[in-house]
Amino acid sequence: MQQGWLGVDVGGTASRWVLVGAEGEIRARGETGGTTGHLFNPAARNAFVQVVSAIVDAVGTHGPLSGVCLGVTGLGGRAIDEAKAIVGELAGLPVTAIHAMNDMELAFRAAFAPGTGHLVSAGTGSVGLHVAADGTLVRVGGRGLLIDDGGSGTWIALEALNQLYRRIDETGGPAEARVLADGLFAAIGGDDWDTTRAFIYGSERGRIGALAQIVGAAAKKGDPLAQQIMQRAGEELARLGLALVKRTQNLPIGYVGGVVNLEGVKPALLAALAGHDVIFPQIDAAHHAALMARAAAEPEMERR
């Protein structure tokens, strides 16, 4: 019976999976909804179970699994063991065949060998990571939208609304930010405070972070407030890279995530990191996770 190893990259808005065979060849890939590793939250735990169940069901059509490796946004500490237990039960595998980590560590390992670089991810949230040669992790940022996540999609969206409502407070309208206001309020569903409040306080972070695309589009159209916010987003992301350099050593700084490609972010980031080696690696984290699952099984395979 053909063996298969599953790799999963679980993000806040989407979860991507790849199944590889005995020679490391890709046998299947797919995508389903996002979730988080905040398993201490009952709702988040239920969402995690649903996402993993959907992936296991989809992969099941391609034959039995031999092992799983997954990176999950927000996963850490004692929740790692719980996540492994959940996946093992749903996949019908022993916990020893399950490997779990934060999605940022998975992304780093897909981009760099340990000790050779720094990685900053800018998507729904923002976080920076260095994995030392001995496996030690140095993490900066990544504290969620209620504390910081500077330069992330949620940060951009909330900063845009904050600045818009300050102008509305002072002038009765969006002032010079009409293009930004029109785009955001159309996406939210109305320009009254009740609509905005219901959208922001009733949405999960991925839905809020998606509004960053509206801010980027307004910046591209010349909206001055949107341009200012995207400039600041680039500077915030540069700060994470500089923090990793300061904490460790001067190594290449890689940036991944959809926010990096929004209007104005990359130029601001590069200007703030003048003199540093900045790269924008293209990674397939789910595929790398599948290869990690297969590699972890190699000693057992050799003994057979």
Image (cartoon, helix red, strand yellow):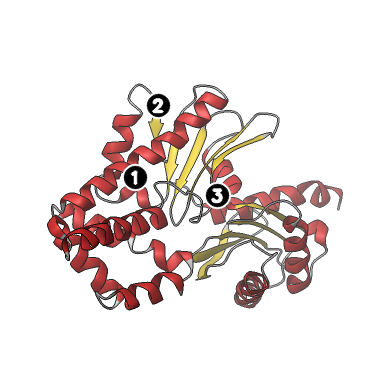
Sequence order check, earlier mark of 1 and 3: 3
Residue 161 screen position, x and y as percent: 31, 61
**Which amino acid does the dot numbered 1 rest on?**
Ala
Figure check: 262 above or below 39: above
Looking at the image, is mark 2 or mark 1 nearer the viewer? 1
Which residue, as the protein is rendered here, is positioned at the far right? 303
Between residue 91 and residue 11, name the one nearer to us. 11
Q: Identify residue for label 2.
A: 277
Disc 2 crowd rating (10 Å Cα; few below 14, some 14-19, many 20+) is few
Q: Which mark is residue 143?
A: 3
- Alpha carbon distance from label 1 to label 3: 16 Å
- Determine the residue positioned at 40% across, 65% down: 208
Q: Secondary structure at mark 2?
A: loop
Where is residue 115? Give x, y as percent: 60, 28
Query: Which residue shows up at 56% across the image and 56% down it?
Result: 286
Evaluate if marks 3 and 2 touch, with contact meaning CB atoms under 8 Å apart.
no
Q: Which mark is residue 233?
A: 1
Front residue (pair 14, 153): 153
- At label 3, counting other C-alpha atoms closer than 10 Å, the crowd grade (few under 14, some 14-19, many 20 or more) is some
